[in-house]
Image (cartoon, rainbow, N blue to C red):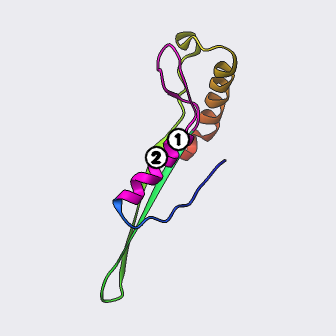
């Protein structure tokens, strides 16, 4: 797993971090989707508001893109993409309780 922690201070920094993730995202073309995710992406935004009285408010936003698990017979996947699809399905099945 490649996890990166980036501190941001403004909306532009968040956009830059999203673009870094976009560039490293694994995708492949299938009959169903020309940019099918072949990797999972989790983008977590932790927000902290520091008030003048010393108190703080905090929140978290989780953005999750799970790799696709399209039906093999509809995708036309072969070779490496087919093998990736099999692994993606197994990983999703094994980790399903984490997302429920």
Residue 81 is left or right of residue 59, and the answer is right
Please report the residue visible at 61 percent of the width from the left and 28 percent of the height from the top.
89
Q: Which residue is mark 2?
A: 19
Please report the residue visible at 61 percent of the width from the left and 53 percent of the height from the top.
3
The magenta segment? 12-39
Q: Position of residue 53 (x, y in %)?
A: 31, 89
Mark linked to residue 83 = none
Quadrant housing residue 10:
bottom left
**Marks 1 & 2, CB-CB < 8 Å contact:** yes
Residue 54 is left or right of residue 37, and the answer is left
Mark 2 falls on what kind of element? helix
Q: Does the segment drawn in magenta span residue 33?
A: yes
Q: Position of residue 61 (x, y in %)?
A: 41, 56
Q: Which residue is mark 1?
A: 23
- Is residue 24 visible in the rendered structure shown here? yes
Q: Position of residue 43 (x, y in %)?
A: 48, 51
Q: Is the residue 10 above or below the residue 40 in the image? A: below
């Amino acid at each position: 797993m490649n996890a990166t922690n980036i501190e941001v201070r403004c909306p532009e920094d968040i956009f830059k971090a999203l673009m870094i993730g976009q560039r490293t995202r694994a995708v492949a073309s299938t009959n169903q989707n020309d940019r099918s995710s072949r990797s999972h992406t989790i983008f977590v935004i932790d927000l902290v508001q520091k008030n003048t009285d010393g108190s703080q408010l905090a929140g978290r936003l989780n953005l999750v893109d799970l790799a696709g698990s399209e039906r093999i017979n509809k995708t036309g996947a072969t070779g490496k993409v087919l093998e990736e699809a099999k692994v993606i399905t197994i990983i999703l099945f094994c980790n399903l309780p984490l997302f429920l």
